[in-house]
Image (cartoon, rainbow, N blue to C red):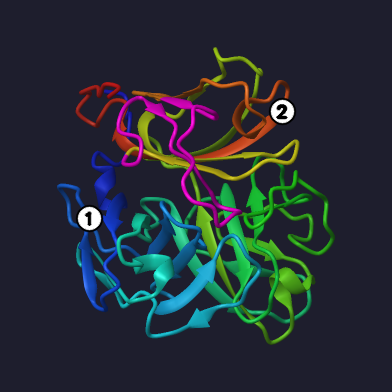
Amino acid sequence: MAAYTTIDNPELYFQCKLYTGNGTNDTAQTFDGDENMQPNMTWIKSRSATENHHVFDSVRGANKRLLTNTTGTEFDDSSNLQSFDSDGFTLGTADGINKNTATFVCWGWKESATAGFDIVTFTGNGSARTISHSLSAKPEFFVVKSRTYGEQWECYSKTIGATKCLQWDDDSAEADIAGRFNDTEPTSSVFTVGDADAVNKNTYTYVTYLWRSVQGFSKMGSYTGNGNADGTFIYTGFRPAYIMIKNASASGNWELFDNKRSTYNLMHATLYADTDGAEYTGTGNQIDVLSNGFKCREADTNTNGSGNTYIYMAFAEAPFVNSNGVPCNAR
């Protein structure tokens, strides 16, 4: 029998959680999935309020916050995330993650070579160098952020290659900026950083989040927009639970979709990784989620501009066909 997926249950490695803040310390949030999952990375954003995107991970420590939409340094405070739990996480009192009556979304990832996600920290030395990772395969998307120096989030994508980069905190198109990845492609064991302050300033500390595609669970890739409501179809091999899209050819926000904020096939509730804005729920930028991928349904520059190249990263709600040969359906 053909191998359709290596992960039958995506909830073991990725889950999404919606909740309403209460402003109270030590508020536990439990994931809604059938499987317990202790995350190693949580990305939290207020849906209803103008607040920054908060990223926490277990390698740096639960209290230590970074913000994807700013160049700010790591902030360690007791009001931030309190802990990563056996099936969720515990909140502090910070408005950005637990403002009273505000609504929030959390995306959580489990660090695992099996699921194609790794977290690496290192100290810069100011000279081009390689850094080891534990994916056991070539990373297809990774982002480097200085923890101690106010620099941008530098993003590598296999689509644009190591000679160029994008920034999570910026809506700009791909650019060839010297010193980021030393024009060197990552391998199955290392990635390369150049001599730029943003990725390798001497004595400064950094964190890197790395992902690779895993059949039936995750997909990093690209597509070309057609500028039409009958838009491009992107095959992933699974029904997506989460999709991130960025126009690499032109200026455009980092679009973030998920299956909890949009509960039917047409995903239209959008957040932008590069801004602090509240959730957009208009009809623009709509994505049609299918059992084996997604299809663009708007002629919008952010997701489907004619002739533009887009990079994307998606994680599964369910594989198109599980390891026993049983198919899933669109919602």
Relative depth, front residue between 296 and 38: 296
User: Going 47% across and 84% down the picture, which residue do you hit?
Assistant: 76
Instruction: Look at the image and give the residue range highlighted in magenta.
Output: 260-288
Q: Is residue 164 left or right of residue 269?
A: right
Q: Residue 259 location in percent, x, y? A: 34, 37
Task: First in sequence, mark 2 or 1: give its number.
Answer: 1
Q: Which mark is residue 248?
A: none
Residue 67 figure quarter: bottom right
Looking at the image, residue 64 lies above or below residue 208? below
User: Going 35% across and 24% down the picture, which residue do you hit?
Assistant: 265
The stretch drawn in magenta includes residue 268: yes
| Tag 1 secondary structure | loop
Residue lying at the far left of the rendered structure: 34
Q: Residue 179 location in percent, x, y? A: 81, 64
Residue count near mark 1 (Cα–Cα under 10 Å), binned few <14, some 14–19, many ≥20: many
Question: Mostly what secondary structure, the magenta segment?
Answer: loop
Relative depth, front residue between 179 and 317: 317
Q: Is residue 101 left or right of residue 231?
A: left
| Residue that badge 1 annotates | 31
The stretch drawn in magenta includes residue 9: no
User: Going 46% across and 46% down the picture, which residue do you hit?
Assistant: 279
| Tag 2 secondary structure | loop
Looking at the image, residue 176 lies above or below residue 144? above
The quadrant of the picture occupied by the C terminus is top left
User: Going 69% across and 54% down the picture, which residue do you hit?
Assistant: 170
Q: Residue 174 location in percent, x, y? A: 75, 45
| Residue that badge 2 annotates | 308
Q: Residue 117 location in percent, x, y? A: 44, 56
Residue lying at the far top of the rendered structure: 230
Residue 180 figure quarter: bottom right
- Amino acid identity at mark 1: Phe
Can residue 314 be seen here? The reply is no
